Image (cartoon, helix red, strand yellow):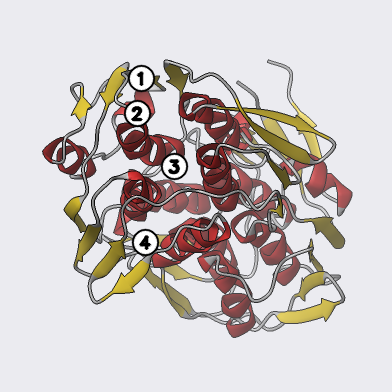
Amino acid sequence: MSTVTVFPSELAGTVTGISSKSYLHRLLMCAALSGTATDISFRGLSNDVQASISAVSALGAAVTAADGLLQVRPAPRAAAIDVGESGSTFRFILPLLAAHTAEETVITGSDYLAGRPISPLYEELIAHGAAISEKGRFPLSVAGPLMGGTYRIPGNISSQFVTGLLLALPLCAEDSEIIVDGPLQSKPYVDITIECLAQFGVGVEEIAGGYRIRGGQRYSSPGRIACEADHSNAAFFLAAGALSDAGAGVSGLKLPSAQGDSAAIRILQAAGAQCIQQGADTLFRRGELIAQDIDATDIPDLVPILSLVAAMSTGTSRIYGAERLRYKESDRLHTVATLLNALGAQVEEQADGLIITGRPQLKGGVTVSSYNDHRIAMTAAIAACFAAEPVTITDFQAVNKSYPDFLTDLAAIGGIYRKEVE
């Protein structure tokens, strides 16, 4: 456990973007399935990505990390893996194990992860031949063989269900279709999956209402591949720039990008922040920030930091389409509202979003919780930089889930913090 106090400060400059967690999860699993050597260049390893590094051992691969390179090599298959708190790792590896081997694999993880939604993916896998122990608890055992066919997945729970199936079904002997009932929320994450699959020679056809996957495909390694920078985590520093008179931003972002959270750039511009592109650097500088309505259907991870910008803009902003945030590391609609209100903002919680009335400055001078949620912790830290008084944040170690070097990067652009003695 860790407690950090962040002080009001002048932020200016750029940080180098860390590698996309979304891409690394998928590239690691594709590389493990290819059966030959793959080198993935990267910057920064989070706890979630470490979980996927561990998990691919069950697919018959070993990963070593050194000098900015993840080396994925064939290795004896592990019979047990620990997915930690990584929902992506768990939801991707479950169908993959059922399709990859008839031998039993035991999955362990945190109690928190065991309680996150896994239906109806769980039931669809069992209906197509997978043998899986009782859901809702760890350890969980899974074995194949998984059969192809028609899989029905609702679009409003988790796009990770679709990604897990897209990774697994090409390994089945039969052709398959995934039918998505209703609009697919967070579809850009599925687009990333299809992009990664293509880089390993696996084809997916997008059809009306879903996807068609040819069976009997084989993963083929491209040899060496670079992982692009993470727009989800970059958004915290882009937003910091939008609140800063001097300007701040991130170096190395791919533009345009399949990552849905690259929308942060468009949304901050719409709020009135000045966007400055200088070579590989994407910077923002404060302008006359104004309220706006934000549809969070495809960008739920941006809601905490965009809510902070809205809280310091003129007028009343509405964020909607975000009901799935209630099932993240915390109930993020509730924890974002609680955090910002504690800092002196005016936020009203709605069933599927937030109503935020802007104020010129946050007051700070309080102790707040991260709720063991990495995006709440980082939002609180950025907010503290622009508050009138310091803010103490408990359980700050939550940032290790996605961005272990967050405080180091914050300090590099002028952020001031103190780790409290506990």
Element at badge 3? helix
Report the amino acid beneath label 2. Thr
Element at badge 1? strand
Give the distance between the C-alpha atoms of the residues marked 3 and 1, in whole angstroms. Answer: 18 Å
Q: Quadrant of the N terminus?
A: top right
Say which of 188 and 152 sits in front. 152
Mark 3 / mark 1, whichever is N-terminal: 3
Packing grade of label 4 (10 A; few <14, some 14-19, many >=20) is some
- Residue occupied by mark 4: 348
Report the amino acid beneath label 3. Ser
- Residue occupied by mark 2: 101
Give the distance between the C-alpha atoms of the residues marked 4 and 1, in whole angstroms. Answer: 45 Å
Q: Quadrant of residue 129?
A: top left
Report the amino acid beneath label 1. Thr
Q: Quick check: marks 4 and 1 in contact, CB under 8 Å?
A: no
Mark 4 / mark 3, whichever is N-terminal: 3
Report the amino acid beneath label 4. Glu
